Image: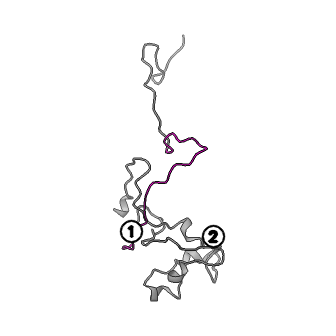
């Protein structure tokens, strides 16, 4: 005698309806690029609220044309400790001056130097997929 658990379908059950999946490429072959959809960075505005604990602050201004290379970081023209007050910008967090091991440095840690790997400007782009995301309860 073979026992079939409740999660096993019996022969009398109809087959489930096939699920239709739609990729973000919309059927465009991998050998071709999708045309970019129009979006723009938002103009200067007040800093945005954070949506989850430990979220890096969002950039409340356009960064179009900003250069961040190994020799120059445009963000530091306003956010460096020496320039922040005059620029009316927040100072770079002290956490950006520590190595992975916690050693304090005189300058920004190389792992925190490329600002836009964590901090992003806002855009008017539509979400790629529908979602029901809600801010963390403690931040609502």
Q: Residue furthest left?
A: 140
Q: Residue furthest top?
A: 1
Q: Identify whether 38 is placed above or below 132.
A: below
Is 58 magenta? The answer is no
Kindly identify the residue that appears in the image at 53 percent across and 77 percent down: 75
**N-terminal label among 2 and 1:** 1
Q: Which mark is residue 111?
A: 2
Horizontal and vertical percent position of residue 25: 51, 44
Seen at 49% across and 45% down, the residue is: 24
Q: Quadrant of the N terminus?
A: top right
Residue 42: % across, % down: 40, 67
At x 43%, y 57%, the residue is 38
- Residue labelled with disc 1: 48
| Of 123 and 130, the residue lying toward us | 123
Residue count near mark 1 (Cα–Cα under 10 Å), binned few <14, some 14–19, many ≥20: few
Determine the secondary structure under disc 2: helix
Contact, mark 2 vs mark 1 (Cβ under 8 Å): no
How far apart marks 2 and 1 lie (CA) works out to: 24 Å
How far across and how far down the image is residue 62, in percent? 45, 71
The span shown in magenta is 24-48
- Circle 2 packing at 10 Å, graded few (<14), some (14-19), many (20+), is few
């Amino acid at each position: 005698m073979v026992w079939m658990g409740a999660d096993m379908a019996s022969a009398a059950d109809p087959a489930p309806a096939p699920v239709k999946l739609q990729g973000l490429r919309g059927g465009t072959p991998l050998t071709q690029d999708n045309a970019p959809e129009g979006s723009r960075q938002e103009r200067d505005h007040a800093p945005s609220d954070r949506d989850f604990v430990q979220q890096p602050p969002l950039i409340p201004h356009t960064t179009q044309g900003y250069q961040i290379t190994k020799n120059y970081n445009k963000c530091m023209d306003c956010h460096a400790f020496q320039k922040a007050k005059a620029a009316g910008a927040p100072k770079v967090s002290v956490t950006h001056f520590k190595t992975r091991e916690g050693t304090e440095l005189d300058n920004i840690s190389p792992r925190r130097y490329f600002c836009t790997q964590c901090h992003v400007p806002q855009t008017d782009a539509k979400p790629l997929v529908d979602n029901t995301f809600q801010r963390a309860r403690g931040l609502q």
